[in-house]
Amino acid sequence: MRVGYSRISDQQQSTSDPLATAERELKRAGAEQVLVEVGSGTSDEQRPKFRQLREWILDGKVTEVICPSQDRLGRNLDLVLQFVQLCHLQKVKLTDLNGRELEVQTADGRLMTTIVGALDQHRSQLYGEKVRRAMESAKEQGLPVRSKLPFGFRKIRNEAGRFIAVEVDPVTGPLARQRVDWFLKDHLSIAALTRRIVEEHPDHTMSMRQLARWIESPMLTGRYCWHQNSAKRTTVVATTPAFEGLITDAEHQAILTRMQQARTNKARRGRQQRMFSGLCRCNDCGEVLMYRIIRTDLQYLRCSNQLCKRRSKAIRLDKVFAVLQYAINLHALTLVPLLNQPKSDPPEVFKLQAEINQLRAISGTEAVIQAKEQEIAKLRSLDDAAPARLIVGALRSQSFWLQEDAAINNQLHGMVDRVLVDLGERVGEARVVEVRCRTKPASAPLPPDQDNILIPVTADQIRLTLHQQELVQQTLEGFGCG
């Protein structure tokens, strides 16, 4: 089979459709199967079709590979030479659209392939250095630099055509705001949100991966961003907004929290929901501990990270259970007085109020003041006491620890952020070193002796006002344990 392969680094790098053009040219050159994709040429991590091509070659399904030019295989010299060597070993002919055969067996062929590959890699590295210098310069001046903006924004250019600022796009801005509302107010998952967009915004669709990255982007809050890591996550963000945003900081934090919860739930999808699934983590590597069940009355949690020095070390499940009971009981006692106190405003509210007082002395700022007042209202409406009420309610509920494992696991994820375990060298040395709750304060107390745990708290020791009892009951019913 003759296979054509091509790639581009970025879908938006050309006003035309370079992938469609490459596909037509490769088919015209005689390719029976064409593989085209978007991915960086410096590695093959984000190029599944290139990896698929290698698998076909190893399976003996390919007789010839055709590419538009050598740099379409990659801009990493080692990667290209390895691929050319693989084609030679499998007796697969490798040519470009100019008719040049890529090979490394003859002296001239290896020289030509190496020189062209080195030049491609050099060009890529030079471009990367240029981009980094431009980003650093833009960051120092507080100016935008990225050629791409999140959906919902557009560029403002000066008379010379230079990109100088960002504003909300009057066409796509309302659509972007509607998508945020669907996610936060209608509680749609990323998959459901993608389907809703296809149905209601067919001219502006996104893939699930694009949508997840877009909705987490700090630029939606009106802040410039300058750096990204290999996972396309922003690493450097301006501390203050520089243009009108689509969402508030509180909404952005709510989005990040929901996305983190979704990733945790996705990791647990398809597995039997046991009591501590996805909750306990190794103190050395941070990976989630996995169940190891020997028999019904002998169960362990162990680290399965191949790179962790505590790999395969374990802790008895009953010890974690006892420590968590102790921690939640004592933590509930510290939370009860806090629940009975009047709710105080978060620090962000006082900062916004100070900004409003300054703006009142300036004419023409009524719209800005109104936006900040709306942001204050949203901050005050956030229910950050729900995890605390859930912890107190769990202690008061006689049936909480008697539920099925899946139900307890769901509720524990609502009240506990993580349980860190030091696995030690032997099972007898394993200890719980932290129980961190989703409350303020977060750290729950641990028993002094984890081998002999006595819980000194009973439900009768907790007294709540009638108002708080009603809120606790509502919280418990929301988690299915009312």
Image (cartoon, helix red, strand yellow):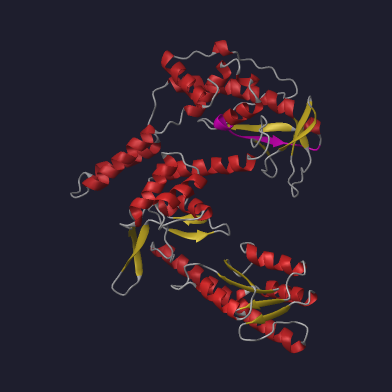
Is residue 75 visible to the viewer in this orientation of the structure? Answer: no
Q: For residue 282, which quarter of the picture?
A: top right
Which residue appears farthest toward the left when viewing the image? 363
Is residue 19 visible to the viewer in this orientation of the structure? Answer: yes
User: What stretch of residues is rendered in magenta?
Assistant: 413-425
Seen in the picture, residue 481 relative to 21 is either above or below; the reply is: above
Which residue appears farthest toward the top when viewing the image? 460
Q: Where is residue 451 in the image (x, y as percent from the top left)?
A: 75, 23
Q: Position of residue 45 (x, y in %)?
A: 64, 62
The residue sitting at 41% across, 46% down in the picture is: 180
Q: For residue 480, which quarter of the picture?
A: top right
Q: Is residue 387 magenta?
A: no
Left or right for 345, reference 331: left
Q: Position of residue 157 (x, y in %)?
A: 32, 68
Left or right for 430, reference 100: right
Q: Is residue 414 magenta?
A: yes
Q: In which quarter of the image is the N terminus?
A: bottom right
The residue sitting at 40% across, 35% down in the picture is: 346
Q: Position of residue 286 (x, y in %)?
A: 66, 43
The residue sitting at 72% across, 31% down in the picture is: 431
Q: How many labels does the image show?
A: 0
Left or right for 66, reference 160: right
Seen in the picture, residue 394 relative to 347 is either above or below; the reply is: above
Seen in the picture, residue 455 relative to 348 is either above or below; the reply is: above
Seen in the picture, residue 312 relative to 82 is either above or below; the reply is: above
